[in-house]
Image (cartoon, rainbow, N blue to C red):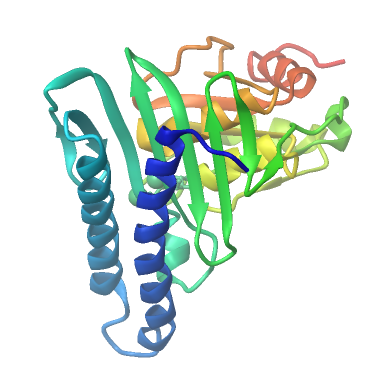
Amino acid sequence: MARTALMNVMVAAVLKAGRGLARDFGEVENLQVSLKGPGDFVSAADRKADKTLIAELGKARPTYGFLTEESGAIEGNDKANRWIIDPLDGTTNFLHGIPLFAISVALEREGKVVAGIIYNPVLNELYTAERGAGAFLNDRRLRVAARKALPEALVGSGVPHLGNPPDAGETALAQRINERTAGMRCLGTAAIELAWVASGRYDAYWHFNLHPWDFAAGALMVREAGGKVSDMTGKEKLTDRGSVLAGNQVIHTELVALLANKTPR
Ligand code: IPD
Ligand code: CA
Ligand code: CA
Protein backbone atom coordinates (compact mmCIF):
# COMPACT_ATOMS: atom_id res chain seq x y z
CA MET A 1 0.00 0.00 0.00
CA ALA A 2 1.41 3.42 -0.95
CA ARG A 3 1.70 5.62 2.14
CA THR A 4 2.12 9.37 2.41
CA ALA A 5 5.43 10.81 3.64
CA LEU A 6 3.76 11.70 6.95
CA MET A 7 2.45 8.18 7.44
CA ASN A 8 5.87 6.70 6.58
CA VAL A 9 7.43 8.83 9.32
CA MET A 10 4.79 7.76 11.85
CA VAL A 11 4.93 4.07 10.92
CA ALA A 12 8.74 3.97 11.14
CA ALA A 13 8.71 5.54 14.63
CA VAL A 14 5.95 3.28 15.90
CA LEU A 15 7.55 0.10 14.51
CA LYS A 16 10.83 0.97 16.20
CA ALA A 17 9.19 1.65 19.58
CA GLY A 18 7.03 -1.46 19.07
CA ARG A 19 10.10 -3.71 18.64
CA GLY A 20 11.32 -2.54 22.05
CA LEU A 21 7.95 -3.10 23.69
CA ALA A 22 7.59 -6.58 22.17
CA ARG A 23 11.05 -7.55 23.52
CA ASP A 24 10.18 -6.19 26.97
CA PHE A 25 6.81 -7.95 26.91
CA GLY A 26 8.65 -11.27 26.44
CA GLU A 27 10.67 -10.47 29.56
CA VAL A 28 7.55 -9.69 31.64
CA GLU A 29 6.56 -13.36 31.59
CA ASN A 30 9.81 -14.28 33.37
CA LEU A 31 9.35 -11.52 35.94
CA GLN A 32 5.78 -12.55 36.90
CA VAL A 33 7.14 -15.28 39.14
CA SER A 34 9.68 -13.09 40.95
CA LEU A 35 8.72 -11.70 44.35
CA LYS A 36 9.14 -8.08 43.23
CA GLY A 37 7.02 -8.60 40.11
CA PRO A 38 7.46 -6.75 36.83
CA GLY A 39 6.09 -3.31 37.96
CA ASP A 40 9.30 -1.25 37.75
CA PHE A 41 10.37 -3.05 34.62
CA VAL A 42 7.06 -2.17 32.90
CA SER A 43 7.38 1.52 33.89
CA ALA A 44 10.87 1.51 32.38
CA ALA A 45 9.56 -0.13 29.17
CA ASP A 46 6.83 2.52 28.96
CA ARG A 47 9.35 5.37 29.37
CA LYS A 48 11.73 3.78 26.86
CA ALA A 49 8.96 3.59 24.23
CA ASP A 50 8.11 7.24 24.96
CA LYS A 51 11.77 8.27 24.44
CA THR A 52 12.05 6.30 21.19
CA LEU A 53 8.90 7.90 19.78
CA ILE A 54 9.97 11.42 20.75
CA ALA A 55 13.47 10.86 19.29
CA GLU A 56 12.27 9.33 16.00
CA LEU A 57 9.39 11.75 15.38
CA GLY A 58 11.59 14.66 16.50
CA LYS A 59 14.28 13.65 14.00
CA ALA A 60 11.76 13.61 11.13
CA ARG A 61 9.79 16.72 12.15
CA PRO A 62 12.12 18.78 14.39
CA THR A 63 9.76 21.72 14.89
CA TYR A 64 6.63 19.87 16.04
CA GLY A 65 5.56 19.84 19.69
CA PHE A 66 4.47 16.85 21.78
CA LEU A 67 1.85 15.86 24.31
CA THR A 68 2.72 12.46 25.71
CA GLU A 69 1.41 10.60 28.73
CA GLU A 70 4.92 10.06 30.07
CA SER A 71 6.58 13.41 29.22
CA GLY A 72 3.63 15.81 29.32
CA ALA A 73 3.62 18.81 26.99
CA ILE A 74 6.78 19.68 25.06
CA GLU A 75 6.49 22.94 23.12
CA GLY A 76 7.75 23.01 19.55
CA ASN A 77 8.69 26.04 17.44
CA ASP A 78 5.83 25.13 15.14
CA LYS A 79 2.75 25.88 17.25
CA ALA A 80 0.36 24.42 14.67
CA ASN A 81 1.56 20.81 14.86
CA ARG A 82 1.91 18.49 17.82
CA TRP A 83 2.12 14.76 18.33
CA ILE A 84 -0.24 13.24 20.89
CA ILE A 85 1.26 10.01 22.20
CA ASP A 86 0.46 7.16 24.52
CA PRO A 87 3.60 5.01 24.36
CA LEU A 88 1.85 2.11 26.08
CA ASP A 89 -1.92 1.91 26.28
CA GLY A 90 -3.07 -1.16 28.19
CA THR A 91 -0.34 -0.99 30.83
CA THR A 92 -2.16 -3.33 33.20
CA ASN A 93 -2.51 -5.94 30.46
CA PHE A 94 1.20 -5.61 29.66
CA LEU A 95 2.04 -6.01 33.33
CA HIS A 96 0.01 -9.22 33.53
CA GLY A 97 1.45 -10.72 30.36
CA ILE A 98 -1.77 -10.18 28.38
CA PRO A 99 -0.91 -9.29 24.77
CA LEU A 100 -3.55 -6.56 24.40
CA PHE A 101 -1.68 -3.28 24.49
CA ALA A 102 -0.72 -0.68 21.92
CA ILE A 103 1.27 2.39 21.02
CA SER A 104 -1.04 5.25 20.06
CA VAL A 105 0.28 8.22 18.07
CA ALA A 106 -1.77 11.04 16.58
CA LEU A 107 -0.79 14.23 14.79
CA GLU A 108 -2.85 17.25 15.71
CA ARG A 109 -2.72 20.15 13.24
CA GLU A 110 -4.37 23.51 14.00
CA GLY A 111 -6.34 21.77 16.77
CA LYS A 112 -7.61 18.93 14.55
CA VAL A 113 -6.29 15.37 14.50
CA VAL A 114 -5.14 14.68 10.94
CA ALA A 115 -3.37 11.34 11.29
CA GLY A 116 -3.33 8.45 13.75
CA ILE A 117 -1.69 5.08 14.37
CA ILE A 118 -2.51 2.37 16.87
CA TYR A 119 -0.02 -0.51 16.87
CA ASN A 120 -0.04 -3.79 18.72
CA PRO A 121 3.41 -5.31 18.14
CA VAL A 122 2.51 -8.75 19.52
CA LEU A 123 -0.52 -9.35 17.30
CA ASN A 124 1.22 -7.36 14.55
CA GLU A 125 -1.86 -5.22 14.02
CA LEU A 126 -1.06 -1.76 12.64
CA TYR A 127 -4.08 0.55 12.43
CA THR A 128 -3.53 3.74 10.43
CA ALA A 129 -5.77 6.64 9.45
CA GLU A 130 -5.41 10.01 7.78
CA ARG A 131 -8.10 12.62 7.74
CA GLY A 132 -10.16 12.25 4.57
CA ALA A 133 -8.22 9.19 3.37
CA GLY A 134 -9.82 6.34 5.33
CA ALA A 135 -8.67 3.92 8.02
CA PHE A 136 -6.70 0.71 7.54
CA LEU A 137 -5.68 -2.40 9.45
CA ASN A 138 -2.32 -3.30 7.95
CA ASP A 139 -3.31 -2.93 4.27
CA ARG A 140 -7.03 -3.59 4.60
CA ARG A 141 -9.51 -0.70 4.43
CA LEU A 142 -11.73 -0.54 7.52
CA ARG A 143 -15.47 -0.03 7.82
CA VAL A 144 -17.45 0.10 11.05
CA ALA A 145 -19.90 -2.78 11.62
CA ALA A 146 -23.23 -2.66 9.81
CA ARG A 147 -25.30 -3.96 12.75
CA LYS A 148 -28.28 -1.71 13.30
CA ALA A 149 -30.01 -3.03 16.40
CA LEU A 150 -28.90 -2.64 20.00
CA PRO A 151 -29.70 -6.28 20.92
CA GLU A 152 -27.05 -7.40 18.38
CA ALA A 153 -24.46 -4.85 19.45
CA LEU A 154 -21.24 -5.77 21.24
CA VAL A 155 -20.18 -2.76 23.28
CA GLY A 156 -16.80 -2.07 24.87
CA SER A 157 -16.14 0.06 27.92
CA GLY A 158 -13.78 0.49 30.86
CA VAL A 159 -14.89 -0.65 34.28
CA PRO A 160 -14.21 1.70 37.15
CA HIS A 161 -11.70 0.27 39.62
CA LEU A 162 -9.42 1.22 42.50
CA GLY A 163 -7.64 4.39 41.35
CA ASN A 164 -10.33 5.10 38.74
CA PRO A 165 -13.64 5.51 40.62
CA PRO A 166 -16.93 5.66 38.69
CA ASP A 167 -18.42 8.91 37.43
CA ALA A 168 -21.82 9.81 38.89
CA GLY A 169 -24.35 7.27 37.64
CA GLU A 170 -21.76 5.33 35.61
CA THR A 171 -22.51 1.95 37.16
CA ALA A 172 -26.23 2.35 36.52
CA LEU A 173 -25.49 3.37 32.91
CA ALA A 174 -23.35 0.29 32.39
CA GLN A 175 -26.19 -1.86 33.66
CA ARG A 176 -28.70 -0.11 31.40
CA ILE A 177 -26.48 -0.70 28.36
CA ASN A 178 -25.74 -4.33 29.28
CA GLU A 179 -29.43 -5.14 29.65
CA ARG A 180 -30.15 -3.93 26.10
CA THR A 181 -27.15 -5.17 24.11
CA ALA A 182 -25.44 -8.43 23.17
CA GLY A 183 -22.88 -7.75 25.90
CA MET A 184 -20.08 -5.62 27.18
CA ARG A 185 -16.32 -6.17 26.86
CA CYS A 186 -13.71 -4.42 29.00
CA LEU A 187 -10.29 -5.13 27.53
CA GLY A 188 -8.29 -2.45 29.36
CA THR A 189 -6.97 -0.62 26.31
CA ALA A 190 -9.04 2.30 25.06
CA ALA A 191 -6.83 2.75 21.97
CA ILE A 192 -7.28 -0.82 20.73
CA GLU A 193 -10.95 -0.84 21.66
CA LEU A 194 -11.55 2.29 19.56
CA ALA A 195 -9.61 0.66 16.71
CA TRP A 196 -11.96 -2.33 17.12
CA VAL A 197 -14.97 -0.07 16.63
CA ALA A 198 -13.31 1.11 13.40
CA SER A 199 -12.70 -2.48 12.29
CA GLY A 200 -16.23 -3.63 13.16
CA ARG A 201 -15.21 -6.09 15.89
CA TYR A 202 -17.06 -3.88 18.36
CA ASP A 203 -20.27 -2.02 17.52
CA ALA A 204 -19.56 0.72 20.04
CA TYR A 205 -17.27 1.85 22.85
CA TRP A 206 -17.90 4.25 25.69
CA HIS A 207 -15.66 5.49 28.48
CA PHE A 208 -15.65 8.37 30.97
CA ASN A 209 -12.51 10.33 31.88
CA LEU A 210 -10.18 9.50 29.02
CA HIS A 211 -7.14 11.60 28.17
CA PRO A 212 -6.35 12.89 24.64
CA TRP A 213 -3.49 10.36 24.32
CA ASP A 214 -6.01 7.53 24.93
CA PHE A 215 -8.48 8.60 22.24
CA ALA A 216 -6.86 11.01 19.71
CA ALA A 217 -5.76 8.35 17.19
CA GLY A 218 -8.73 6.05 17.93
CA ALA A 219 -11.38 8.73 17.40
CA LEU A 220 -9.92 9.57 13.97
CA MET A 221 -9.80 5.85 13.14
CA VAL A 222 -13.51 5.41 13.91
CA ARG A 223 -14.53 8.53 11.96
CA GLU A 224 -12.42 7.52 8.96
CA ALA A 225 -14.05 4.06 9.04
CA GLY A 226 -17.47 5.72 8.73
CA GLY A 227 -18.41 5.76 12.42
CA LYS A 228 -19.40 8.51 14.84
CA VAL A 229 -17.51 9.77 17.87
CA SER A 230 -18.78 12.21 20.48
CA ASP A 231 -18.91 12.79 24.19
CA MET A 232 -21.73 11.09 26.13
CA THR A 233 -24.15 13.87 25.27
CA GLY A 234 -23.53 13.63 21.51
CA LYS A 235 -21.18 16.65 21.17
CA GLU A 236 -18.52 15.95 18.56
CA LYS A 237 -15.80 18.02 20.20
CA LEU A 238 -13.97 15.82 22.69
CA THR A 239 -12.40 17.46 25.71
CA ASP A 240 -9.37 16.63 27.81
CA ARG A 241 -10.43 14.25 30.60
CA GLY A 242 -13.74 13.95 28.81
CA SER A 243 -16.10 11.15 27.94
CA VAL A 244 -15.99 9.29 24.64
CA LEU A 245 -18.76 7.42 22.86
CA ALA A 246 -17.93 5.80 19.51
CA GLY A 247 -19.94 3.55 17.25
CA ASN A 248 -21.51 3.05 13.88
CA GLN A 249 -24.06 5.74 12.99
CA VAL A 250 -27.14 3.85 14.16
CA ILE A 251 -25.79 2.28 17.34
CA HIS A 252 -24.13 5.59 18.29
CA THR A 253 -27.46 7.41 18.01
CA GLU A 254 -29.22 4.71 20.02
CA LEU A 255 -26.61 4.88 22.75
CA VAL A 256 -26.70 8.68 23.00
CA ALA A 257 -30.44 8.37 23.58
CA LEU A 258 -29.97 5.57 26.09
CA LEU A 259 -27.27 7.47 27.97
CA ALA A 260 -29.53 10.52 28.10
CA ASN A 261 -32.03 8.29 29.86
CA LYS A 262 -34.43 8.29 26.92
CA THR A 263 -36.23 5.08 26.06
CA PRO A 264 -34.60 3.25 23.17
CA ARG A 265 -36.70 1.75 20.42
C1 IPD B 1 -5.78 3.12 30.23
C2 IPD B 1 -6.48 2.17 29.28
C3 IPD B 1 -7.76 1.66 29.88
C4 IPD B 1 -8.69 2.79 30.31
C5 IPD B 1 -7.96 3.76 31.25
C6 IPD B 1 -6.68 4.27 30.58
P1 IPD B 1 -3.10 3.17 30.17
O1 IPD B 1 -4.58 3.64 29.65
O2 IPD B 1 -6.77 2.79 28.05
O3 IPD B 1 -8.47 0.84 28.97
O4 IPD B 1 -9.78 2.21 30.99
O5 IPD B 1 -8.80 4.84 31.57
O6 IPD B 1 -6.01 5.14 31.46
O7 IPD B 1 -2.96 3.64 31.59
O8 IPD B 1 -3.02 1.70 30.04
O9 IPD B 1 -2.20 3.92 29.24
CA1 CA C 1 -3.81 5.10 27.90
CA1 CA D 1 -0.16 4.72 28.88
- Front position in the image: 30 or 17: 17
Rendered position, 20 above or below 198: below
Rendered position, 256 above or below 116: above
Residue 196 falls left or right of residue 71: right
Q: What residue is rendered at 42% in x and 57% in y?
A: 15
Residue 157 in view (yes/no): no
Rendered position, 189 above or below 225: below
Q: What residue is rendered at 55% in x and 33% in y?
A: 129
Residue 121, horizontal then vertical, whole percent: 50, 62
- Quadrant that contains the C terminus: top right
Residue 219 in view (yes/no): yes
Splitting the image into 4 quarters, where does residue 133 fall?
top right
Residue 125, horizontal then vertical, whole percent: 59, 55
Rendered position, 174 above or below 248: below
Residue 97, horizontal then vertical, whole percent: 48, 74
- Quadrant that contains the N terminus: top right
- Front position in the image: 50 or 16: 16
Q: What residue is rendered at 71% in x and 37% in y?
A: 141
Residue 148, horizontal then vertical, whole percent: 87, 25
Residue 199 falls left or right of residue 104: right
